[in-house]
Image (cartoon, grey):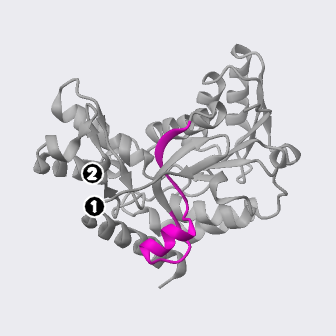
């Protein structure tokens, strides 16, 4: 993908981390256009722009609305963070309204791809797709990609081994997430056939509560989710075709199978220059039941039912 403009909406903790990673994660030459609705980031922008002296071919612009509409890839990080004692869904209305305010007025490049990081990521992913009118495949939420790598990390830390875990978490990025054990592996073999289920349960519990654990000392989560966003960026840029569980608006077929209204949630997708393309999905009956429940959680908040 021949990148020219990469826009970064919001320069809070996650936005700053992504901005720094963007400078050195790719040899491509492009403009990083930082757009922040708060109007209070001059110092942060200036600090980030000084880094460009070490990365020839890259530059940083501030609040360039003309460049925003020309963006090839947009990271949406703007909005309120999740309260320490709340959950992602508690900030849905506020961040949905902000997303509509940002995305609706812009005439977007037809090939633009938006990587959504703002929470609640599934609802904001749906909102951004409807606000931009871009194809569903071109609006990608980090979703349960983060939960999947958190679970990988938890298993690695608890096993203290060199085993390679590849977990697949789907559904809501939140407490109703579904661990698709039938799709998860250890050293390329089926996880559920080679690892004790109680041990898996304990690692999953750590994953579900990871954000609250992190916020006890850090205040917010931003390292891992930024790494997820950058991996998606790299897959798009290189047309990698890597299969990753990400949030996107469901296809008609998936809506029918889950018995839900139009929503976004995470399912395995191939990530490339066209965005996120759903791959074939074969779940156990129990996993499908759990996924339907997870879809209902998102649907209830999104439609107020």
Residue 123 rendering spot, x and y as whole percentages: 54, 65
* Mark 2 closeness class: few <14, some 14–19, many ≥20 residues within 10 Å: some
- Of residue 212 and residue 116, the one placed in the foreground of this image is 116
Pointers 1 and 2 in contact (C-beta within 8 Å) = yes
Please report the bounds of the magenta region as a residue range: 241-264
Above or below 237: residue 192: below
Residue 55 placement, left or right of 265: right
Is residue 219 in view? no
Residue drawn at the location 52% of the way across and 69% of the way down: 253
Residue 6 rendering spot, x and y as whole percentages: 73, 38
Residue 16 placement, left or right of 166: right
- Extreme residue in the right direction: 66
Residue 195 rendering spot, x and y as whole percentages: 14, 42
The quarter of the image holding the N terminus is top right
Residue drawn at the location 42% of the way across and 61% of the way down: 172
Residue 191 rendering spot, x and y as whole percentages: 22, 43
Which mark identifies residue 257?
none
Which of pointers 1 and 2 lies earlier in the amino acid sequence?
2
Q: Which residue is mark 1?
A: 284
- Of residue 64 and residue 285, the one placed in the foreground of this image is 285
Residue drawn at the location 64% of the way across and 43% of the way down: 11
Q: Which residue is mark 2?
A: 182
Measure how far apart labels 1 and 2 are at the Cα level: 7 Å
Above or below 40: residue 267: below
Is residue 236 in view? yes
Q: Secondary structure at mark 1?
A: loop
Residue 298 placement, left or right of 67: left
Asked if the magenta segment contains residue 253, the reply would be yes
Q: How many marks?
A: 2
- Extreme residue in the bottom direction: 305
* Mark 1 closeness class: few <14, some 14–19, many ≥20 residues within 10 Å: few
């Amino acid at each position: 993908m021949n990148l020219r403009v990469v826009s970064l909406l919001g320069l809070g903790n996650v936005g700053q981390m992504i901005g720094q990673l963007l400078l050195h994660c790719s040899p491509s030459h492009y403009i990083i256009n930082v757009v922040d609705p708060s109007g209070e980031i001059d110092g942060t922008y200036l600090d980030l722009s000084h880094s460009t002296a070490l990365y020839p071919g890259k530059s940083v612009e501030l609040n360039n609305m003309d460049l925003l509409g020309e963006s090839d890839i947009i990271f949406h990080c703007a909005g309120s963070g999740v309260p320490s004692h709340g959950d992602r869904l508690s900030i849905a209305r506020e961040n949905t309204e902000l997303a509509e305010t940002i995305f609706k007025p812009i005439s977007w490049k037809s090939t633009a791809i938006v990587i959504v990081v703002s929470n609640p990521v599934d609802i904001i992913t749906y909102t951004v797709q409807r606000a931009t009118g871009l194809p569903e495949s071109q609006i990608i939420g980090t979703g349960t990609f983060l939960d999947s790598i958190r679970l990988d990390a938890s298993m690695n830390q608890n096993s203290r081994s060199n085993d390679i875990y590849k977990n697949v978490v789907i559904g809501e990025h939140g407490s109703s997430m579904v661990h698709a054990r039938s799709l998860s592996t250890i050293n390329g073999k089926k996880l559920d056939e080679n690892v004790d289920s109680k041990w898996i349960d304990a690692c999953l519990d750590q994953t579900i509560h990871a954000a609250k654990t992190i916020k006890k000392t850090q205040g917010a989560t931003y390292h891992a989710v930024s790494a997820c966003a950058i991996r998606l960026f790299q897959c798009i840029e290189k047309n990698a075709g890597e299969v990753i569980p990400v949030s996107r608006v469901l296809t008609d077929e998936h809506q029918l199978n889950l018995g839900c209204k139009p929503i976004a949630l995470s399912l395995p997708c191939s990530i490339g220059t066209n965005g996120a393309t759903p791959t074939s999905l074969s779940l156990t009956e129990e996993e499908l039941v759990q996924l339907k429940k997870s879809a209902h959680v998102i649907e209830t908040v999104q439609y107020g039912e």
